[in-house]
Amino acid sequence: MNVLAVVAASPDLPRLASSEELARIQEAPGVTMRVVTDATAARVARMLSMEQYDAVLWIGHGEAGSLLTQDGRIDPQWLAAQLSSRRVKTAIIATCWSSLRPVGGQQAAQSFADALPASGIDTITMQTSVSDRAAIEFDVELLTQLAAGLSLRTAYQVALNRAAQFGEVQAPQLSRRDSDQQADVLRNMDARVEDIQDTQRQMQHSLDRLEERLAVVERDLRQMHNPHIDRQYLVVGAVVMAAMLILLLFVTWRLI
């Protein structure tokens, strides 16, 4: 299971206790993890573009309708677009209040629990604030069980029971992906792949034609430098010169 862990610190808030969590997740059998520290939107987008991830774990501070980063905020629609375009299956938004919509929001899908599932991503968000210890235990247990092959719903229940041992039973919320939306996303991605393949085929056809023309030019050049042809030109030239010499001698004899 390939996991991207995003550690998004905010300069105005306390540092995150992420070292233990990341170390324990990396030790889980079957988990391969890449980490973005001091995350910004640009760094997250760049890391997502580098390889395929099964899950994204976001560790940081948040509020209703936004995630705080090193240089600003990330909204649900931006994150949904990034993850869906990379076919990420699961997102764990382990920040306080990530299930909530901002007050006065004008759009229907303003929370991460709305926007990400609507883009075909199974999403776990937090309905309330959550302690560092409970969040760490929940995240570690969830990813460990997913890597072991459990279904998301079963792994979620196991992780929820683990967090309950630290007094946290209400914060983590599972929002399943919208199947129709996911199918649309996959169809759009397949259409884009087909367009790319068509372009590649056209480029290959043009390359083949160019190679054929180059082969003709090379053949003509070889013929121009063919020694047999050069000798033929020399023989013809010698014959012509001999004929002209004979003609000149004949004309000279007649004049004499």
Image: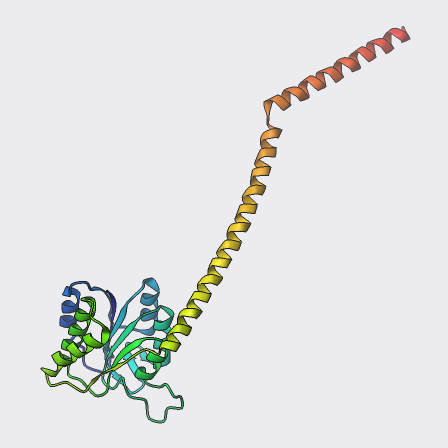
> Residue at point 55% right, 50% down?
206
- Say how many tags the image has: 0
Instruction: Give the residue furthest to the bottom.
Output: 104
Above or below, 245 relative to 100: above
Quarter residue 114 falls in: bottom left
Viewer-nearest residue: 52 or 120: 120
Quarter residue 132 falls in: bottom left
> Residue at point 27% right, 70% down?
55
Viewer-nearest residue: 7 or 208: 208
> Residue at point 80% right, 11% down?
246
Above or below, 171 relative to 2: below
Provide residue 82's location: percent of width, then percent of height.
36, 72
Q: How is the image coloured?
A: rainbow
> Residue at point 71% right, 19% down?
236
Instruction: Give the residue furthest to the left.
Output: 165
Which quadrant: the N terminus? bottom left
Provide residue 222's location: percent of width, then percent of height.
58, 30
Looking at the image, residue 199 sits to the left or right of residue 110; the answer is: right
Quarter residue 140 falls in: bottom left
Which quadrant: the C terminus? top right
Above or below, 52 relative to 117: above
Provide residue 136's location: percent of width, then percent of height.
15, 76
Viewer-nearest residue: 246 or 229: 229
Above or below, 129 relative to 7: below
